[in-house]
Image: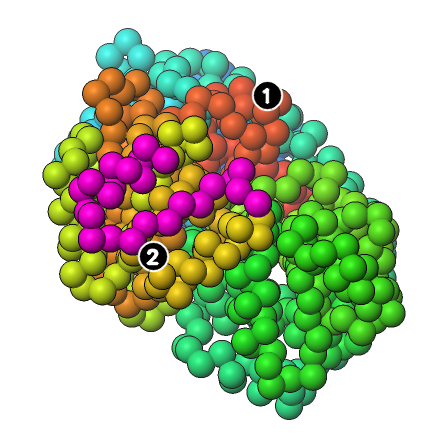
Amino acid sequence: MERSSGSDRLLIVSCIPYFLEKGNIWFEKNINKILDAQKTQIFFQENAIFLEENKECHFSNFLRKLDEMGYEKVLTITEPGEFSKRGGVIDLFPVNLMQAARIEFYGNKIENILELPIKINSEKEIKDRLIRKLKRREQFSIKGTIKPGEYLVHLDHGIGKFAFLKDGYYVLEYDKGDRLYVPLGLERKLSRHIGFREPVISRLSSSLWEKTKKKVKEETEKLAKELLEIYAKREVSRRPPYLKDDEMQNNFEAAFGRDETPDQLQAIEDIKNDLYKDFPMDRIVCGDVGFGKTEISLRAAFKAITSGRQTAMICPTTILANQHFQTVKDRLKNFPVKAALISRIQTKKEQKEIIKKTGSGEIDLLLGTHRILSNDIEFKNLGLLIIDDEQKFGVRQKEKLKKIRPDLDVLSLSATPIPRTLYLALSSLKGISLIQTPPPGRLSINTKVMPWQEKEIKKAIELEINRGGQIYYLHNRIETIGAAKSLLEELSPECRIGVAHGKMKEKELINMMNDFKKRKFDILVATTIIENGIDLPNVNTIIVAEAANLGLAQAHQIRGRVGRSTKQAFAYFFFGKSLSQKAKLRLKALKQAQELGSGYKIALRDLEIRGAGNVLGKEQSGSINQVGLNLYCQMLSDTIEKLKPQYEFSNS
């Protein structure tokens, strides 16, 4: 705090990287230059305030200025970039000082400027953390178009409803008819409210919002400590680093035959960087259906095998395991790698032979369902576990192999996207790679949501058959699936129709899918058994009966069964006469979010509609609703960043 001629003076600068990158001594040396610059330069007029005791300073304008300069209003200040207000007293921690200050107003006059005992010891550490915090605030802020009626969260004032844009301001409506005008350019203080139920609108000029934030911050601190302890324990394990790329790896990758997307290449690089370290990988590759996660996993498996380690790949269904096995055989046919599939399709004798070869190390890559987790299967040198559609497996199943081999590398694939906010919050702990770019030439799926009409179904079938394609007809009731087939035979008597459902014997089911792939049928009437990763490029129309009974994320996943080539694909979602409000919202969201890569939007909308969820654990749902998922994740991310130096991380 600058003292001059017996009166206290205080310089306050904006929370922006330009100032945060300067040392505090710089401000002491250059205070007179800053004050001179304020007279003529707009930058310093907008980003610096100079206060003196016994000088006039409009109280409301001062508070507004702190808001515009990026300071966060809190109940009690603890670190730079924060301020609190009690009556005419402002406690403030300027980012250009090592110590907090108290400013006492008498009306619009500064009566006293006092030092507070709140200090920082390490200027660089705090400022580096603050720069990262500001960047995260930008990432969590509102993006894209916002519509009137949307709930927004203001960092300092709480939850309001967006009304309109006017004269360069976002106008938010609060409780009791109050309005808040937020200037364009201050989006970093606004985020969308995503929660489990309708939020409570905040009251302006109340301390309740600061109290709520304080309580939620304490809860995120507890969760952050639990997460940090888990990951710190995981990193105690060590294993030899994997081998760098050699000629065989390069040849394998070149044999892919298609151009990788930037996201695929980044995910592959992320995985290799994990494997080159000496502690086990735990990474999730998260992306929309059909965006190339399988190829990413095969390159990781090949890397493990050429480094002398076996790989296990577990899938939620026999159909998916069989499809992956066919893909693996095709990709590995020119390489000295042995792969095998184990499931209930094989005879006991065949299974026994595969188990024996796995135990001796003759099999490099073993694919299957949870059968791989059975006690009779032992690996000679298991190094990598790939979990496809990881959300389909329980925690105990996923942890079983990890317990057997603490140094096991784990790669999880998920087509049910997580909100980007959660990704940002957890990415400093868990390896997460996002796949959001569609493959070259891929078109978005033309989605039609409409009441049940047999003539529309007949028209959709004719359109696909006339261009030489095939059709999925989703009917999710096994007891009436025969009647659904009969209806289609009446509507399209020239079509060959097959049936697939979960009560069929697995061998019969696999044969049916193989026959459909070989185009022995034009239409496959199926239950949601087709949901997981079935990849048939010639099937470009899907018709869903009773679509209102599907969850939103599930409907989006099923829609992704078509459109796997460069042909225009169609998805028809039919619903009955009576619809619940939630079903209407689900179908509306499905129609709105049909562009490629929209799974993230689907996941967020699903979170709003379902009314419950388990993003971070149900015990967090109350806190998430109070401040919204975006701000909650921002708080969690900030807390992890703050606490992380207390834990030993080899990748920190």
Segment colored magenta: 482-505
Foreground of the two, 213 or 392: 392
Residue located at (39% from left, 15% from top): 200
Residue 547 place in picture, x, y as percent:
31, 33
Residue 95 place in picture, x, y as percent:
53, 44
Residue underneath mark 1: 215
Cα distance in 3D space between marks 2 and 1 = 60 Å
Q: In which quarter of the image is residue 34?
A: bottom left
Residue located at (64% from left, 54% from top): 345
Q: Quadrant of residue 441?
A: bottom left
Other-residue count near label 1 (Cα within 10 Å), few / some / many at <14 / 14–19 / ≥20:
few
Query: Image height check: is 258 above or below 357?
Result: below
Q: In which quarter of the image is residue 241?
A: bottom right
State the SS at label 1.
Answer: helix
Foreground of the two, 157 or 316: 316
Residue located at (51% from left, 50% from top): 509
Q: Residue 387 carries which label?
A: none
Foreground of the two, 327 or 85: 327
Q: In this view, does 625 lie to the left or right of 336?
A: left
Residue type indicated by callout 1: Lys
Residue underneath mark 2: 521
Query: Image height check: is 245 above or below 217?
Result: below
Query: Image height check: is 474 above or below 210?
Result: below
Which comes sooner in the sequence, label 2 or label 1? 1
Residue 146 in magenta? no
Residue type indicated by callout 2: Phe
Task: Count the marks.
Answer: 2
Query: Image height check: is 97 above or below 303?
Result: above
Residue located at (64% from left, 26% from top): 218
